[in-house]
Amino acid sequence: MPVTVKVRRVGQRGPPLELPRYETDGAAGLDLRADEPVTLAPGERRLVPTGLALEIPPGHEGQVRPRSGLAVRHGVGMVNAPGTIDSDYRGEVGVVLVNHGQEPVTFARGDRIAQLVIGPVVRAELALVEDLASSGRGGGGFGSTGR
């Protein structure tokens, strides 16, 4: 069942861009667009504004995820993937892009730069204990399960 997310345009950097939308019937993410032109030099990272502020319903979050095509074609990804948008955040959504490629990459205003996935959030209650139940993995991490 769809969840309604309220959207407000912010920044006024030019004519209004189209609102994020699902590009296919099976798409999980809405495409976010750059609200200003940006060129990323190799190794450079930058916060790119989208020109949008959101009101995500309580009990949900927004996840900003990289676009796979940008990674494959240009080596562009996100530093903090996924980025989390909390339901009580009302500021402009920004995307922290990084150029891992060998050449500068330029995005025009309106280019698709990331995906927004809306999903439910489960809030945990923490219980301080003396011992944890054993598991087959134990404390092994960072590659301990093999290649």
Image (cartoon, grey):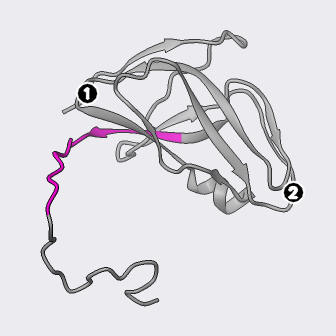
> Relative to residue 59, is residue 121 depicted above or below?
below
Amino acid type, label 2: Glu
Image position, residue 26 (x, y; %): 35, 47
> Relative to residue 99, is residue 87 depicted above or below?
above
- Discs 2, 1 touching: Cβ within 8 Å: no
> Relative to residue 14, is residue 82 depicted above or below?
below
**Residue 117: in magenta span:** yes
- Where's the N terminus, which quadrant? top left
Residue lying at the far front in this picture: please name it: 130
Circle 2 Cα neighbour tier, 10 Å, few/some/many (<14 / 14–19 / ≥20): few
Image position, residue 93 (x, y; %): 54, 27
Residue 20 relative to residue 75: left or right:
left
Residue 136 relative to residue 83: left or right:
left
What secondary structure is found at the residue carrying circle 1? Answer: loop
Magenta stretch prevailing secondary structure = loop
Amino acid type, label 1: Val
Q: Nearer the viewer, residue 29 or 93?
A: 93
Q: Which residue is mark 2?
A: 103
Q: Earlier in the sequence, mark 2 or mark 1?
A: 1
- Which residue is rendered at x = 54% and y = 12% of the image? 9
What is the quadrant of residue 36 in the picture? top right
Residue 117 relative to residue 15: left or right:
left
Q: Which residues are magenta?
A: 115-129
Can you tell which mark lies on residue 3?
1
Image position, residue 50 (x, y; %): 61, 26
Q: Nearer the viewer, residue 98 or 114?
A: 98
**Residue 10: in magenta span:** no
Residue 110 relative to residue 67: left or right:
right
How many angstroms separate mark 2 from mark 1 (CA)?
40 Å
